[in-house]
Image (cartoon, grey):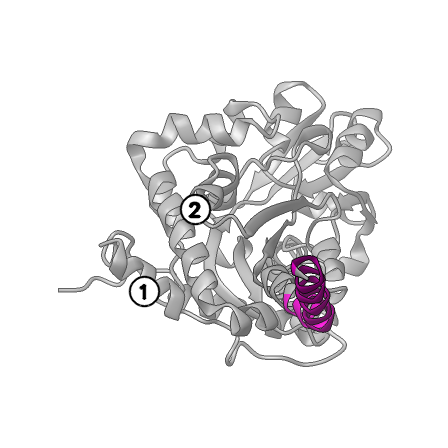
Amino acid sequence: MPIHNRRGFGHKRGGVFSTLLPSIILLALFFASMNAAEALTIRIGVAATGVGNRQFVGSGTIAVLHSEHYLEEEFKNDPDIKIEWFFFKGAGPAVNEALVNKQLDFAMQGDLPAIIGRANGLKTKLLAANDVRANIYLAVASKSGVTTIEDLKGRKVAQFRGTNMQIPVDKILAAHGLKETDIKFINMDVGTTAAALASGDIDAAFGQADFIDYEQKGIAKIIYSTKGDDLGFTRHSHVLVTEDFEQAHPEITARIIKSWVKAAAWASDENHRDALYEIWGRSGYPLEIFRADFQDVPLKSRLSPLIDDFLVAAYATKINEAKAYRLLRNTTTVDGWFEPKYLKQALQDLGLDHYWTPNDAAGQPIVTQ
């Protein structure tokens, strides 16, 4: 009889368990799906690479943010949040393609590619500046015979088309009585340009500060740079976020921009100038090019994250110029594009409200009492 009772009890318990099993499985799947939903990978694209496609860049706040692991430190106590970095040899246009394919959440890129992306329907918000007033250099092959910008007429000239260099170059040419159709432009990335200059396959090239290294190695000679010239000939870059990510994760967006401001503040400190060059040097470029490019230039003036009148006006002007140069198939404006609230909050939280000086639309400092 006791044995019979135990069997009956066991049989009944098994029946209850069998009845509850589907519910238990559903609950387990529910909680598993909740955990999966809470896990988040933040995908960050950078419109540049280092020498030989190194996964480091040699300019801007983005290099410090990445190399010194600011974001990884910010989210170290959030095991469900992962940071992934992607560096694009194809620069801004390649970043746009990744954004179109929804492969990125944040991106650092130049002004013109972002403008083209916006005009073509990309939904993004510009959150902070990365490197403003960046210079352009004109290098010529040693046997080209080119000594002035005017000499470029009819010559083969390399340029990385579709990047934030294209419009300033057009303006530089116009200031010297030339237009794009006067030049035989060839689209080349950084590495290809160096080889073409050395071989004499091209007569000249417009590019970045790495041309300083070309000159020091005897590959080419720099005959012009925008240093000390019209600010309208310089170029700018920024960090942006997709509208989808920003709307879904405003608190995380705020934390990322707070980390950005921390990195920008460190990079803007003159006491860190040599250390900053060392960080940029992880890209593989010689430190001397950074020293030369930034000679007599306050770090704060180039590495300010501020969304000030100068930055907004510069982007608005670039949009109009892109239309004039027929680089846009569709129209767009800066209206509603910049989202400064995260930057303002970060500056306030970090006590950096007055660390950088904002500039007016003409690029002159706004002096506050």
Q: Quadrant of residue 152?
A: top right
Out of 144 and 302, give the one closest to the viewer: 302
Q: Position of residue 146 (x, y in %)?
A: 73, 36
The N terminus lies in quadrant: bottom right
How far apart in space, not on screen, are marks 2 and 1 (Cα)?
22 Å
Label 2 vs 1, first from the N-terminus: 2
Is 21 one of the magenta-colored residues?
yes
Q: Dot 2 corresponds to which residue? A: 77
Q: Check the image and report above or below for 191 versus 17.
A: above
Residue 28 falls in which quadrant of the image? Answer: bottom right
Task: Say few, some or many: other residues with alpha carbon within 10 Å of mark 2 (under 14 / 14 to 19 / 20 or more).
Answer: few
Residue lying at 75% horizontally and 30% vertically, measured from the top left: 194
Q: Main secondary structure of the magenta part?
A: helix
Q: Amino acid at mark 1?
A: Gln
The picture places residue 39, in percent across and down from the top left corner, at 59, 57
Q: Measuring 39% from the left and 46% from the top, which residue is drawn there? A: 264
Residue 247 drawn above or below residue 257: below
Q: Secondary structure at mark 2?
A: loop
**Discs 2, 1 touching: Cβ within 8 Å:** no
Q: Tell whether 32 sits left or right of 135.
A: right
Residue beneath disc 1: 345
Bounds of the magenta segment = 2-27
The image shows residue 58, relative to residue 326, as above or below, that is: above
Q: Nearer the viewer, mark 2 or mark 1?
A: 2
Q: Residue 154, image x and y in percent?
A: 83, 48
Residue 310 on the magenta segment: no
